[in-house]
Every structure is written in structure tokens, then in C-alpha cells.
Image (cartoon, rainbow, N blue to C red):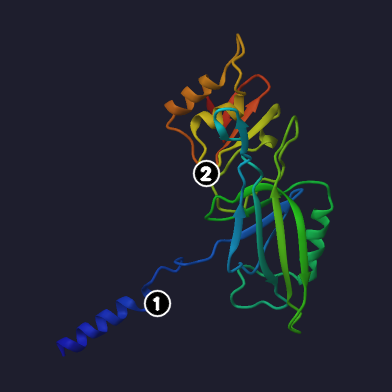
Amino acid sequence: MVSNFFSSLVSSLLSPSNSSSTANQPPKIYLQCNKEKIQFPIPPSSFEVSVKQNNSTVNINNLGELNMIGKTGLITMSFSSFLPNQNYDFCQCTADKPYNYVKTIEKWRTSGQPSRFTITETPVNYPVSIESFKYGEKDGTGDVYFTIDFKEYKYTGNAVDNTVSDVTGLSNRSDASTIADTTKNITVYPGDSLLDVASRAMGSTIKKGSNSYLDLYKSLAKRGGISTGDIISVTKNNTVKIGDSNVSL
């Protein structure tokens, strides 16, 4: 009897019904443009994010080749999945008709406006251009298989970002659309140091009578540093914000 009791106890503890309902749930994937948004109903089995560092090699007399560390390149992202022609049990949301998704993505691709691509539970949350979109059918079910490629889009000058998602579940982050006089947004990438970010945000030249990158560096250090994915906004009058929080210089 004792043996049977412990066997039943162990079985109940290991049964799926006692495991977390949120364990091993795949992230949700969103794409939005011009205040419209879609959620891809079928998460991909994998996705890929890539970025290059624009380093260069120079040859100096008496020294030979030297590696000159440059600025970071644009992030590229790609994934493949399918748009279901029926509401499968593993759909993450109620699916629209496959070619309605195709029509929307094609409209955004050719709109001349950046989109925002987000994968929840990951650092992927970037303004992007849709670089390529390939789709088609192959098994007679009416499901539409696709591959989509993105490239990071960086706002410059007085351009503003109106693609902020309100449905991703990520921490809220401020974009240029919430700051009327924003002139520059700096995204913190993996491997960035405080000095790298401060230099990109303020410029590496110290101007007499104005705040410098060293002032920002000291302020960021005092506030406890920065995190990958943070967006630092610098306004025309050198006011600095991280999200909705002001940074005192």
C-alpha cells in the first residue's frame, strides 16, 4: 500500500497538469506599420538575427596591418512560417485569411514607411524595412508558406517613429513620436559600453559651453548603467531621456 501511495504521488507530481501552463510557450511575433498591426498566427521553429561591425584593416609602415574598430552595422532579421487556411489548434491567435495577411504585408512593403518588428520575450523590437517577402502554396491545403526578411531602420533628423506597439507585452519604451523635438534616437545593442552609447548620443567632440558625451557617460554610470534594447532620445536642446525618464546632465 505504501509503495502504491508513493508511486501515485510521484506520478501526480510529474504529470503535465501540474506543470506551468506558460512553460515552453513560444514567443509571439508582431509586425505593424502606420498604426495597423498583425500578429503572425503560427510561430516559426526558428528565427535569425544578424549584425555586422563595420571594422576595417589598414596597413601602416613599420607596424603592418592594424584593425580599426568601426561603428555597428544595421541589424537584419529573417524567419519563415506559414499563414493557415484554417484555425489549427496550435495557432496563437484567431487567424485571418492567408491572402489578407499577404495583401497587408505587401501594402506595408511598398508604402515607403518603416514598420516595427517585435518578438516578445526577446530583445527584438526594432523599426525595420521589409527587404523581401516570398510566399506560395505547396501542399494543397490552402496554407500559404512564406519567408520574410527585415533590415533595421534608423530615424534621423526630425523623423519620428509612429510604430510603437501597445500589444506586445514588452516594457514600454519611448519613441520619437512621444518627444516633439527629438533629433536623435540611440538604441543600446549587445556589447555596447556606456562610453560607446554616450559618444553616439552626444557626439565625440566636446563643445565649449554645452553638454558633452562625458557628462552623459557620468550620468548613465550614476543611474546604474543601461540595458540592451534601451532607447536613448536626445532633443535639440540636449535634453536626454531613457524611455520616459529624464537623464540629468
Which residue is found at the position 40% from the left and 77% from the top?
Answer: 16
Q: Position of residue 175 (x, y in %)?
A: 65, 38
- In the image, residue 179 above or below residue 228: above
Number of marks drawn: 2
Q: Position of residue 123 (x, y in %)?
A: 55, 50
Which residue is found at the position 70% from the left and 29% from the top?
Answer: 180
Query: Nearest the camera: 180 or 71?
Result: 71
Please tell me whether mark 1 sits on a helix, a strand or a loop. helix
Q: Position of residue 238 (x, y in %)?
A: 62, 21
Which residue is found at the position 77% from the left and 62% from the top?
Answer: 133
Mark 1: which amino acid? Pro
Which residue is found at the position 48% from the left and 24% from the top?
Answer: 219
Q: Quadrant of the N terminus?
A: bottom left
Mark 2: which amino acid? Pro
Q: Which residue is mark 1?
A: 16
The residue sitting at the top extreme is 209
Whether residue 211 sits left or right of residue 180 in the image: it is left
Residue 71 in view of the camera: no
Q: Which residue is mark 2?
A: 190
Mark 2 → mark 1, Cα distance in angstroms: 36 Å
